[in-house]
Image (cartoon, rainbow, N blue to C red):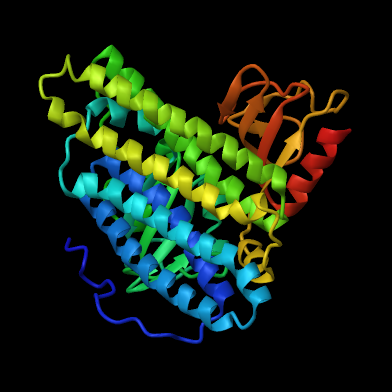
C-alpha cells in the first residue's frame, strides 16, 4: 500500500482556532500509538503497519505546527511566555517521539538489515499489535464497543480506529465499529488471532520466531528490548509528572534516561563485537538504528518533564490535556509495615490489592524490574498505572 494514499498531503498549514488542549490530547494519544505500531512493524516485518506509522507521523507534524501557532497566539505577556515555554517543550518533545518512531518504521520500509533474533525477543517484551480492515459481514460491524465488550470477553483491546483520514484514539464504549474501518488491536497473541479473524474475515498469521544465533548478538538484542521498555516507561512517567506536577516522578524520568543512555553504549559494544561473527555485518545496521531511535524517545521524555524539574508551574492547559487519559501513572514507595509488603505480582498485577498494573519497580541494589513477576518488598519504588481511584488506593496502601 502506498503510505501517501488517503493521508494528508504536503503543503501549507495555516492557523486554525483549535484549542491547545485538544491538540495536546491528540498529540499525546498519537505518540503513544506510534510507539506501539513502530515496534509492531519490526516484529511482523510489516510494511502495512510501517505505512500507518508514516501516515501518523505526517499527521503529527501538522498537529505540532498548529500547536506552536496556537501557543504563539496565546502569549501576550512575560508571564504567559514563562508558563507556556514548558508547553512548547512538550509539543517539541512529542514531535521528537513521532520522528523516532518513524525512524523505526523506516527500517522496515527501507529493508534495512535486522537480526532475526530481534523478532524472537520482541514478542516477550510487548503485546502484539495487529492492523485489520473491518469486514462488512463481521459480527462486530455496526455495534458499539460497549455492546461487544471485547476487552472483558477476550482480553484484546481496540486501541485505535482510522476512518478515512480521521483517527479515533482509545475509542470508548459508545464508539461504533463501522465496515471498512482500519482497526488496531492489542493483546496476547493467543487471544488476538480469533478476534482478528472475526473482525476482518481473514486468517491471522502470527510472526515467526526463529532461534537465537550468536551470544554477543543475543546480548545486543536483550539490551535493545530493555531500552525499549525503559523508554516507554520514561514517556509514561513524564506525562504523569506533568499531570500531578510531581517532581519525584520527573526525577524518575531522569533516572530512566541515564539508564537508557548507558544501555545504548552497551548496545553499540555488543553489536560491534557480534559483527565479527555474522556472515553479513551490514545486517546489523537496523539494530543500531532502532537503538538510536529508542534512546531519542527517552531523551524526549526528559524534555516533557523539564518544566517540572525546573520548578515551573504546570500550565492549566497541559493538566487538562494529560488528565483526559483514562489511565494515570503514580510513583509509590512501599513502606515498611505496609500491607502491600509480601503481595505477589502476576504479570505486574497485584494478586491481592488495588486493580492497578505495576509496570516497573526500582529496587535498591537491583535497579529496575520491568513487568515484574515478583513479590513486593519494603523500599520498592513502584510505578503503577490504572484509574485515578485505583492508583490512589494503591498509594494509600503503600504508606500504611
- Taking the image as shown, residue 278 lies to the left or right of residue 135, namely left
Q: Residue at x 70, y 31 (%)?
A: 381
Q: State whether residue 153 appears in this view.
A: no
Q: Is residue 318 left or right of residue 61?
A: right
Measured as percent of width and height from the top left, residue 35 is found at 41, 49
The quarter holding residue 121 reads: top left
Q: Quadrant of the N terminus?
A: bottom left
- Looking at the picture, tell me which residue is in the foreground, 238 or 206: 238
- From the top left corner, tell me how far across and down residue 335 is, in percent: 83, 28
Q: In the image, is residue 390 above or below residue 347?
A: below
Q: Which picture quadrant has residue 396? A: top right
* Depicted 237 relative to depicted 34: above or below: above
Q: Quadrant of residue 183?
A: bottom left
The x and y percentages for residue 244 are 72, 54
Q: Check the image and report above or below for 274 versus 310.
A: above
The answer to whether any part of residue 364 appears in the image is yes
Which residue corresponds to the image point at 38% horizontal and 27% vertical from the top-left? 265
- Place of residue 8 in the rendered image (x, y in percent of width and height, measured from the top left): 28, 74
Q: Quadrant of the C terminus?
A: top right
Q: Nearer the viewer, residue 210 or 173?
A: 210
The answer to whether residue 309 is left or right of residue 177 is: right
Residue at 71%, 47% (x, y): give it: 247
| Residue at 27% over, 33% down | 287
Q: Is residue 397 above or below residue 317?
A: above
Of residues 304 and 347, the one nearer the viewer is 304
Amino acid at each position: 500500500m502506498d503510505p501517501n494514499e488517503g493521508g494528508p498531503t504536503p503543503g501549507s498549514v495555516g492557523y486554525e482556532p483549535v484549542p491547545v488542549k485538544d491538540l495536546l490530547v491528540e498529540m499525546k494519544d498519537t505518540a503513544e500509538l506510534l510507539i506501539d505500531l513502530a515496534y509492531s512493524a519490526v516484529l511482523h516485518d510489516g510494511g502495512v503497519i510501517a505505512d500507518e506509522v508514516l501516515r501518523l507521523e505526517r499527521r503529527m507534524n501538522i498537529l505540532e505546527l498548529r500547536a506552536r501557532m496556537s501557543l504563539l497566539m496565546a502569549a501576550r505577556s512575560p508571564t504567559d511566555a514563562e508558563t507556556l515555554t514548558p508547553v512548547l517543550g512538550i509539543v517539541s518533545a512529542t514531535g521528537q517521539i513521532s520522528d523516532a518512531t518513524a525512524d523505526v518504521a523506516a527500517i522496515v520500509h527501507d529493508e534495512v538489515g535486522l537480526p532475526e533474533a530481534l523478532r524472537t525477543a520482541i514478542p516477550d517484551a510487548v503485546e502484539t499489535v495487529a492492523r485489520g480492515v473491518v469486514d462488512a459481514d463481521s459480527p462486530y460491524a455496526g455495534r458499539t464497543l460497549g455492546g461487544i465488550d471485547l476487552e472483558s470477553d477476550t482480553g484484546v483491546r481496540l486501541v485505535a480506529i482510522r476512518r478515512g483520514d480521521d483517527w479515533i484514539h482509545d475509542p470508548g464504549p459508545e464508539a461504533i465499529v463501522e465496515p471498512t474501518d482500519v482497526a488496531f488491536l492489542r493483546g496476547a497473541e493467543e487471544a488476538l488471532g480469533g478476534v482478528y479473524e472475526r473482525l476482518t474475515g481473514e486468517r491471522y498469521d502470527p510472526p515467526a520466531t526463529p532461534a537465537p544465533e550468536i551470544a554477543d548478538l543475543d546480548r545486543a538484542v536483550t539490551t535493545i528490548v530493555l531500552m525499549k521498555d525503559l523508554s516507554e516507561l520514561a514517556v509514561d512517567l513524564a506525562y504523569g509528572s506533568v499531570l500531578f506536577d510531581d517532581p519525584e516522578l520527573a526525577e524518575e524520568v531522569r533516572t530512566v534516561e541515564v539508564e537508557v543512555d548507558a544501555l545504548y553504549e552497551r548496545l553499540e559494544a555488543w553489536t560491534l563485537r557480534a559483527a565479527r561473527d555474522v556472515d553479513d555485518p551490514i545486517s546489523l545496521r537496523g539494530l543500531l538504528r532502532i537503538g538510536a531511535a529508542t534512546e531519542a524517545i527517552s531523551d524526549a521524555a526528559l524534555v516533557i518533564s523539564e518544566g517540572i524539574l525546573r520548578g515551573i508551574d504546570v500550565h492549566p492547559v497541559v493538566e487538562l490535556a494529560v488528565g483526559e487519559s483514562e489511565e494515570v501513572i503514580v510513583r509509590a514507595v512501599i513502606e515498611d509495615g505496609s500491607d502491600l509488603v509480601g503481595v505477589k505480582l502476576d504479570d505486574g498485577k497485584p494478586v491481592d490489592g488495588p486493580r492497578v498494573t505495576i509496570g516497573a519497580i526500582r529496587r535498591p541494589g537491583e535497579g529496575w524490574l520491568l513487568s515484574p513477576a515478583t513479590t513486593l518488598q519494603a523500599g520498592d519504588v513502584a510505578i503503577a498505572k490504572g484509574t485515578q481511584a485505583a492508583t490512589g488506593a494503591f498509594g494509600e496502601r503503600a504508606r500504611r
